[in-house]
Image (cartoon, rainbow, N blue to C red):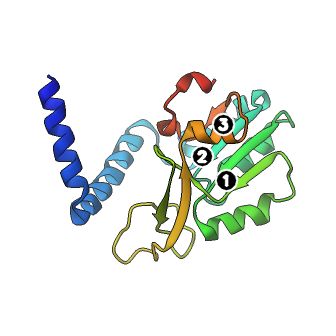
């Protein structure tokens, strides 16, 4: 069993160095994620997916939240609108410069919000971010031909580093659970 894991690990590392293959796999992954999502919900739009209903019911009980890849802040805005002022802090991470400018314009006066022009990753590093011209939701750290300029070098942190840097003890709600190495810190 261990040999199979080692073989797959080696193949994955070799494959990761092939830009065209990575491009193809990311496109496939995006399509696979959509297929899985559509098998569960009608649409990614909050009102159709049921996420809006969940947020409306949870928001009054939430104190600390993290919005990863916030884009223009629809998720955070929904939390704030439904929280009955129970929210103490929302950490909003958006690596894109255009989307971050929209976030700053929308939320800069709310002292409960921490706006960071950074990303969340499985490593602490600086990564090239490929932002689409319209601050689109498909902007990515993965470089695609003819998509954006890819010239934005963005600092990314691990989830634990973010929590330590901001002295966050726990998170009530996180919109990107894939980034969490220690789910015990997320209630």
Label 1 sits on a secondary structure element that is helix
Question: In the rendered view, does 11 fall on the left or right side of 144?
Answer: left
Cα distance between the residues tagged 3 and 1? 26 Å
Q: Earlier in the sequence, mark 2 or mark 1?
A: 2
Cα distance between the residues tagged 2 and 3? 31 Å
Dividing the image into 4 quarters, which one contains the C terminus?
A: top right
Cα distance between the residues tagged 2 and 1? 9 Å
Residue at which label 3 appears: 164
Label 3 sits on a secondary structure element that is helix
User: Is residue 148 something that shows in the picture?
Assistant: yes
Q: Are marks 2 and 1 in contact (CB under 8 Å)?
A: yes
In percent of width and height, residue 133 lies at 53, 76
Compared with residue 25, is residue 187 higher up or lower down, i.e. above or below?
Answer: above
Question: In the rendered view, does 132 fall on the left or right side of 97?
Answer: left
Label 2 sits on a secondary structure element that is helix
Question: In the rendered view, does 39 fall on the left or right side of 44?
Answer: left
Q: Which mark is residue 46?
A: 2
Which residue is more in the foreground, 43 or 136? 136
Question: In the rendered view, does 172 fall on the left or right side of 38?
Answer: right
Q: Which residue is depicted at the point 70% across and 67% down?
A: 102
Mark 2 or 3: the one toward you: 3
In percent of width and height, residue 172 lies at 68, 29
Q: Which residue is depicted at the point 31% across and 58% down?
A: 27
* Total numbered labels: 3
User: Is residue 53 something that shows in the picture?
Assistant: no
Q: Which residue is depicted at the point 48% across and 48% down?
A: 43
Q: Earlier in the sequence, mark 3 or mark 1?
A: 1
Compared with residue 105, is residue 1 higher up or lower down, i.e. above or below?
Answer: above
In percent of width and height, residue 174 lies at 61, 37
Residue at which label 1 appears: 74
Mark 3 or 1: the one toward you: 3
Which residue is more in the foreground, 27 or 19? 19
């Amino acid at each position: 069993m261990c040999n199979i894991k080692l073989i797959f690990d080696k193949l994955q590392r070799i494959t990761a160095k092939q830009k065209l293959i990575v491009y193809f796999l990311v496109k496939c992954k995006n399509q696979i994620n959509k297929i899985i999502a559509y098998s569960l919900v009608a649409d990614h739009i909050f009102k159709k997916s049921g996420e809006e209903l969940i947020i409306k019911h949870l928001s009054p009980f939430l104190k600390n939240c993290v919005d990863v890849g916030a884009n223009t802040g629809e998720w955070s805005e929904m939390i704030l609108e439904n929280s009955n002022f129970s929210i103490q802090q929302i950490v909003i991470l958006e690596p894109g410069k255009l989307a971050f400018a929209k976030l700053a314009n929308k939320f800069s006066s709310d002292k409960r919000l921490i706006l960071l022009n950074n990303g969340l990753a499985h490593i602490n590093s600086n990564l090239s971010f490929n932002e689409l011209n319209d601050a689109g939701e498909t902007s990515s750290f993965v470089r695609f031909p003819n998509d954006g300029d890819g010239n934005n070098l963005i600092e990314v942190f691990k989830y634990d580093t973010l929590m330590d840097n901001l002295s966050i003890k726990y998170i009530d709600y996180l919109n990107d659970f894939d980034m969490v190495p220690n789910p015990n810190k997320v209630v």
